[in-house]
């Protein structure tokens, strides 16, 4: 089943709602700061990557529903929700955004996967190429987290794990922020939250979206200059434990770990010198130590885009 979604447009108000609800203070999204970034090639603030990802997640939810694929996922025990996004060009306020979801394919060898290819366009431009894969085991960072202290509550927020290089950011999941994030992503929050029905279902991208804040705060502590030496996402990869997502409720505590970057690898995202790419392993851990998600966040300096 091939799905082409109805087009949508994001405004600066949508951007502001999404970034304020996730504490994303990247100047590329700020209408007062973006034009002050030296050498910026963009003509407006950028729509958030996680804002687009949440819109994609909801369109995939509708696609699965229409194709009755939830039954297939349950039947094969596909516990993990895996995303891969390669950013090709930016999405700006007013761009007509459309998504193509390629037909679902179930493969059983060498491992069982339900997979789809994704193509996001902004006007006539390809903005993002991606994949969604449902699996029994996580496809990103399957080895898991570095050693964690017990209890996690002993870890200081915006500090490093004791004796390790992993930066820690703590957040509390709030339904109000979740609803606003969905509004910013042009997603109807009532599909996920309804107090009269006692329904609280955080979308997968909401706890992931706080990773941008965690990366920025890590950079602040390391003395990075976001105006003079800004960076952009080249690609993102996520594995989310779908069963653990059901446990995330209002006031759930999330600990995000941003570890030391991995050696540079080739990227199919924004063009740039491979050596300039910086790939951060990241983890989202619940208060009891359960691993909610794993992520690889690849960034590239603005100065390197288009070179090499």
Image (tube, helix red, strand yellow):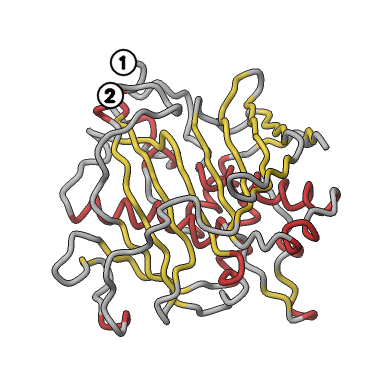
Label 2 neighbour load within 10 Å: few <14, some 14-19, many 20+ = some
The quadrant in which residue 274 appears is: top left
Tell me the quadrant of the picture where the N terminus can be found: top right
How far apart are labels 1 and 2 at the CA level? Answer: 8 Å
Task: Please give the count of numbered marks on the rendered protein.
Answer: 2
What element does badge 1 sit on?
loop
- Name the disc covering residue 34, or none: none
Label 1 neighbour load within 10 Å: few <14, some 14-19, many 20+ = few
Q: Residue at x 26, y 78 (%)?
A: 149
- Name the disc covering residue 307, or none: 1
Is 117 rendered above or below residue 215? above
Q: Does residue 213 appear left or right of residue 115 in this picture?
A: left
Is 211 rendered above or below residue 304? below
Q: Does residue 249 appear left or right of residue 278 in this picture?
A: right
Q: Nearer the viewer, residue 197 or 154?
A: 154
Q: Nearer the viewer, residue 166 or 133?
A: 133
Q: Are marks 1 and 2 in contact (CB under 8 Å)?
A: yes
Q: Pointer 2: what residue?
A: 303
Q: Does residue 247 appear left or right of residue 98 in this picture?
A: left
The quadrant in which residue 259 appears is: bottom left
């Amino acid at each position: 089943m091939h799905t082409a979604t109805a087009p949508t447009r994001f405004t600066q108000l949508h951007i502001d709602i999404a970034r304020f609800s996730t504490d994303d203070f990247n100047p590329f999204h700020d209408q007062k700061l973006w034009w002050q970034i030296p050498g910026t090639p963009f003509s407006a603030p950028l729509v958030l990557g996680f804002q687009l990802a949440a819109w994609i997640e909801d369109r995939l939810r509708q696609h699965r529903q229409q194709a009755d694929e939830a039954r297939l996922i349950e039947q094969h025990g596909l516990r993990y929700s895996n995303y891969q996004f390669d950013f090709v060009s930016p999405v700006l306020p007013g761009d007509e955004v459309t998504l193509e979801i390629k037909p679902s394919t179930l493969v059983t060898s060498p491992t069982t996967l339900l997979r789809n290819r994704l193509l996001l366009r902004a006007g006539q431009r390809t903005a993002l190429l991606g994949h969604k894969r449902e699996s029994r085991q996580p496809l990103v960072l399957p080895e898991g987290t570095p050693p964690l202290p017990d209890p996690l509550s002993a870890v200081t927020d915006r500090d490093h794990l004791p004796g390790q290089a992993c930066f820690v950011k703590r957040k509390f999941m709030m339904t109000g922020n979740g609803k606003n994030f969905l509004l910013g992503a042009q997603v109807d929050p009532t599909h996920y939250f309804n107090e009269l029905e006692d329904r609280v279902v955080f979308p997968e991208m909401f706890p992931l979206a706080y990773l941008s804040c965690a990366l920025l705060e890590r950079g602040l502590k390391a003395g990075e200059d976001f105006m003079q030496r800004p960076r952009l996402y080249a690609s993102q990869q996520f594995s989310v434990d779908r069963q653990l997502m059901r446990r995330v409720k209002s006031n759930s505590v999330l600990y995000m770990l941003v570890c030391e970057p991995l050696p540079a690898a080739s990227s199919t995202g924004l063009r740039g010198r491979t050596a300039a790419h910086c790939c951060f392993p990241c983890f989202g851990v619940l208060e009891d130590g359960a691993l909610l998600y794993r992520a690889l966040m690849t960034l590239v300096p603005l100065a390197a885009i288009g070179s090499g």
